Amino acid sequence: MRLKQFGTRRKVEKDIMNEEQLWLELNAIAHERDAPLPESWKTNYWTLYQLVRQLRPRTICEIGVRAGYSAYVMLRANPTASVLGIEANFDEAVQATSGGKKDFYKHALSTLADYDFDVILADSHSLARIPAVDLVYVDGDHSREGCFRDLDLAFKSNDRVLVHDVTHIRAVQQACDDYVAAHPQLAATLIESPPFGYMLIERKPIRTCTRRQRL
């Protein structure tokens, strides 16, 4: 499977917004089966917007696309960024999908057509690697094992990962805690955003020691 090259679509520039404006825009693009969006999502997406404004990633890989709301927020926060989504597109009537809905990714492709956004249909657990990007956004398999595997996949080629639902789903928090504990080169920061929460996990910078030269 060949992964998409970034930077191939027209960029969209938009102004910085406030929380209410972002929420109105999200409801305007909501899938008909989601509308109106649950009020509990409002602070969650505003927190994501602020995080991306602060981190300024130019390239993002998102594991778990669903209807594209998180991708919209990240691109709204940094309109010149590129986002590549990985979506398993499982049928929720057949198996657990952690809130995912079959074929909702098509809605994401439609609403984000003017941005540099694309989707690969694949189970993230079947991939050997993902592209090297500035930020990996993990919001796919919410089981402890599944999230742990997505973290492992992300850090094979990347140094910064943002995980969603950390304070909302115990298994996700356990996966993050266990992964960080098993990899001392990583540092984690919990970002409160009730009821969901994020965890930013980053590879610690390598300190280089230079030996003093005797005169």
Image (cartoon, helix red, strand yellow):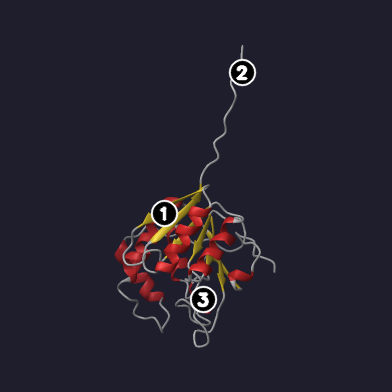
Q: Is residue 75 visible?
A: no
**Could you tell me which secondary element the residue under label 3 belongs to?**
helix
Tell me where residue 164 sits by quadrant: bottom left
The Cα–Cα distance between marks 1 and 2, rounded to whole angstroms, is: 43 Å
Is 28 placed left or right of 67 in the picture? left
The quadrant of the picture occupied by the C terminus is top right
Say if 159 sits above or below 111 in the image.
above
The Cα–Cα distance between marks 2 and 3, rounded to whole angstroms, is: 61 Å
Disc 3 target residue: 110
Question: Residue 201: horizontal and vertical position, in percent?
Answer: 47, 54
Is 42 placed left or right of 116 in the picture? left
Say if 32 sits above or below 115 in the image.
below
Residue closer to the observer: 57 or 173: 173
Is 202 placed left or right of 121 in the picture? left
Disc 2 target residue: 213
Disc nearer the start of the sequence (2/3) = 3
Disc 1 target residue: 53
**Could you tell me which secondary element the residue under label 2 belongs to?**
loop
